[in-house]
Image (cartoon, rainbow, N blue to C red):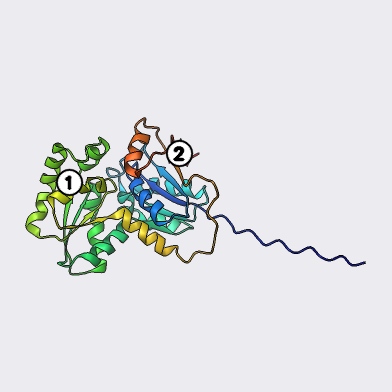
Amino acid sequence: MMHKSEPALAPSTPHRRPIGVFDSGIGGLTVVRHLLEALPDDSFVYLGDTARVPYGNRSRETVRVYAEQCMDFLLQHDVQAIVVACNTVSAVAMDHVMQRSPVPVIGVIEPAAAQAAAVSAAGVIGVIGTRATIASDAYATAIHRHTATARIVSQACPLFVPLVEEGWLDTPATTLVAEAYLSVFRPEDIDTLVLGCTHYPLLTSVIEKLLPGVHLIDCGSCTAVELAHQLQNRPSEAAPPNEQRLHVYVTDPSPLFSELAATFLGMRIGTPHVVTIDHHGIAS
């Protein structure tokens, strides 16, 4: 006697793998803020290497080692792509990370450079960043790949990061520091300014007052838009159900991290997971 076969069960849609993001510290959370908006159906794993911040005063070789260790940690979480939210790594170690990563990698410099080149009518573009980022000339090089005739005016603003982390986002002291740094741009007639550090978008109100009418380029926003564009043709996958969209890891448990994270992200997060560093790298 023949039995009617049971209908085959339709395969379930696989859950979407998370996107990994790493930075030398907390600033990369401004990039995550834009990623959460640009990719609403994705979850993210963020690593802030707070035990070794800043990367900007390290040698190129050391930055490459640190970047590879951060990448390896994120790969342990089965990420589908990696965002290098650190301008220093994006400036001096992107080739190293991209060559070693089995998943797509995107940094913050190239998307911001492309946007600056696209919106600058006069072709005179300002760039501000940390000393290491400005010294690398990475933004100028990237902008010239898109518009060879652009004139680039660069300025290191090393005091901006501690001012932001102190919470002095729009104070008289911050304005005085910003006036000193940004005065180099007034005679140059720039029409576009690249905020070449993930901390700097938090100083937008001060910068806009000192450089009215200048188009500000947020490297985190540009990176989020570019990654969303690159991932738009992915196979259909389900967003993880009932899961926290952002999982945060740090290598040093600063007592101020959660408070600062709320400023950078625009929302509160729980206590971050602390991971350890040894001679093998970063491990959970």
Q: Is residue 59 visible?
A: yes
In this image, 283 relative to 37: left or right? right
Residue 53 image position (x, y, % from top left): 33, 39
Secondary structure of the residue carrying numbered label 2 = loop
In this image, 235 relative to 204: left or right? right
Q: Is residue 280 visible?
A: no
Q: Local crowd at mark 1 within 10 Å, few (<14), some, or many (≥20)?
A: some
Residue at the (14%, 49%) spot, across then down: 209
Residue at the (22%, 45%) spot, across then down: 203
Of labels 2 and 1, the one closer to you: 1
In this image, 215 relative to 186: left or right? right
The N terminus sits in image quarter = bottom right
Q: How far separated are the C-alphas under marks 2 and 1?
A: 43 Å
Nearer the N terminus, badge 2 or badge 1?
1
Residue at the (41%, 60%) spot, across then down: 228
The residue at the far top in this view is: 255
Q: Amino acid at mark 2?
A: His
Secondary structure of the residue carrying numbered label 1 = helix
Confirm or deny contact between disc 2 and disc 1 (CB under 8 A): no
The residue at the far right in this view is: 1
Examine the rendered structure and indicate whether residue 150 appears above or below residue 238.
below
Q: Amino acid at mark 1?
A: Val
Tally the marks.
Answer: 2
The disc at residue 100 is none
Residue 205 image position (x, y, % from top left): 20, 47
Residue 88 image position (x, y, % from top left): 30, 49
The disc at residue 206 is 1
The disc at residue 279 is 2
Residue 269 image position (x, y, % from top left): 41, 39
In this image, 83 relative to 2: left or right? left
Q: Local crowd at mark 2 within 10 Å, few (<14), some, or many (≥20)?
A: few
